[in-house]
Image: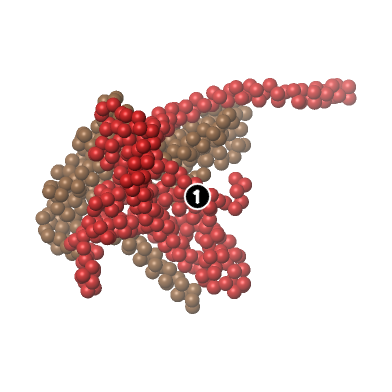
Amino acid sequence: MTRRRDAVVSHALLVLASLVALYPFLSILMLALNEPGRRLSGFALPENPSLGNFTNAWERGGFSDALVSSLIITGTVVVVAVLLSVLAGYALGVLDLPLAKVVVGVFLLGLVMPYEATVIPIYHQMKDWGLLGTYPAVILPQIAFSVALGTVWMRGYFGSIPATLREAGMIDGAGRMQVLRHILLPVAAPAVGVLATLLFLYTWNEFLLGLVLLSDNPEARTTPVALSFFAGNRRESDPGTTAAAAVLVALPVLIAYIVAQRKFVQGLLAGAVKE
Amino acid sequence: MTSTATPRAGRDHAPGPRAPAPAPARRRRRDWWGYLYVLPALAVYVAFALRPIGETAYTSLFEWDGLTLATWVGFDNYTELFESGVLQSTLGHSLVFLVFYALLPTAVGLVIAGLMTRIRIRGLALFRSVLFIPQILSSVVIAVAWRWIYDLGGPLNAVLDAVGLGALTRAWLGDFDTALVSVGLIGTWVQFGLCMMLFLAGAQRIPRELYESARIDGAGAIREFFVVTVPGLRTELRIALVLTSIFALRNFDIVWNTTAGGPGTSTTVPSVYVYEGAFLTREVGDAAAVAVVLTLFILVVVGAVMAGLRDRDAAR
């Protein structure tokens, strides 16, 4: 009896929690679907659903440029950071390197360091190099932070693979690179996938570096930065268009999430604190 | 036969202590070569993460507008920030956010997970996917959504009007009395699903026998929660608190895109001060000093959480 009541109460709680989690996004979706320029308030559902706000936002906010920038930046960061992390994680986790513990400790520090602590010198460095407003200005520091997480992550994973597996390869006369490529990497593919997903999410949503380093050049702005400028410019936009812009910016990540849910969930649950 | 066998055995034995001796020496020399694999990652990390942190600390010892020559002032930036009350006020706001972004979602997640230890959950995967949505959205999108919810004509005020509490309606993010708490609750919303799912997943691993023996000892639901569930979730608690605390203390994106630190300085946190000082008001030395304090503060909080919730069997 109580067991049944427990079950009902628990599921009701889960449904309630899910509604709370969904509501803010649904509220801007409803807002965005209204006809452009309509005075809006409270909970009003769109009477004549229209995509007018979306086309307005798309045209005025420069979101096509932003989407291209985000894709280039995120793609580069994820590919390069995963590659470097696999190499470093393999060496630190599997090869018997001297001082490996110290080096891993140095990488661990990067997991708790905020971008706020590095952004001032990075800005002046990029200015000196003439890179402000260009992709490398944000790509380089984002790779730097991503390899900290990635190296710790891959080292943990490679270290957990039974030594017998790679020793079998060594006996066959395979070199270190061959052991990594042909024996360990196929086994580690799921872990690499989770890492790539997590880095995609962090890089795509990063805001401070983009704001500081890309603001000068509207064409290079990432989607969060473009949205921040668009939403902050109150004269140019009404709530409906701003909401539509936010939905547009959220869409690529939501689609990726629906496609690769399991990887996202695993990544977020394992979190940045593998150690 | 025996005569050939004996020398062989002798030979097997004799090099025994000697043979491994050159091997490690050779291997150790070769092992430094293994660092070639680490070098690319380490180089980027040092150049664009570690070295800038050092430079920030060095910059904090200067008076600098970011353009002209800097003047060495030692620790004056720190003492001035302390005497003017900027440090206390920004860190105070961070502490409030620590409650809303870290403690509150952890508590909510823990209680809900605790309620669910006695039953089987149907559709857990679906709930999990939905509850994670706040984690994957860009913080700027989250800020835009909540600005609408808190708007003068937004859903929150509409609800208050509808239930006869119209007197309470206001622009929640623009009011000195409510801005800080309103921004705080956004953080609670972002983090509660993650905490809940971490604890639910962890609770599934607590051995059933522990609950049974607690029940045999006559423990009620509340006692059971504190004696079995909470200690069983030590690792998950640590993960949740570390992740949410770092998020709470950094917290530039959401504050900047909802209130930008205002009204007045009522929601200014260290990261907002760093951005404004370094790029708007041009007090770069001050901004760097706040960045250093923020970094140390994060290290202390994370260190405290790790030490307080260390695994009992720390054999790892």
Q: Is residue A179 shown above or below B173?
A: above
Residues B38 and B165: in front is B165
Outermost residue toward the right in this view: B2
Give the residue drawn at x 27%, y 60%. B177
Q: Is residue A5 visible?
A: yes
Q: Is residue B144 visible?
A: no
Q: Is residue B237 shown above or below A253?
A: below
Please state the horizontal and vertical placement of residue A217, each as a whole percent of the image: 21, 34
For residue B30, which quarter of the picture? top right
Label 1 Cα crowd, 10 Å radius (few <14 / some 14-19 / many 20+): few
Please state the horizontal and vertical placement of residue B156, each as a whole percent of the image: 24, 64
Q: Colour of chain B?
A: red
Residue that carries the numbered disc 1 in the rendered image? B304
Q: How is the image coloured?
A: by chain
Residues B78 and B142: in front is B78
> Which chain letter goes with mark 1?
B
The answer to whether A172 appears left or right of B266 in the picture is: right
Q: How many marks?
A: 1
Question: Which chain is assigned brown?
Answer: A
Give the residue drawn at x 52%, y 71%. B221
Describe the element under mark 1 as helix, strand or loop. helix
The answer to whether B30 appears left or right of A230 in the picture is: right
Please state the horizontal and vertical placement of residue B183, each as a whole percent of the image: 30, 55
Give the residue drawn at x 24%, y 39%. B281
Give the residue drawn at x 45%, y 75%. A5
Outermost residue toward the bottom in this view: A1
Please state the horizontal and vertical placement of residue B224, each as a whole percent of the image: 54, 68
Q: Amino acid at mark 1?
A: Ala
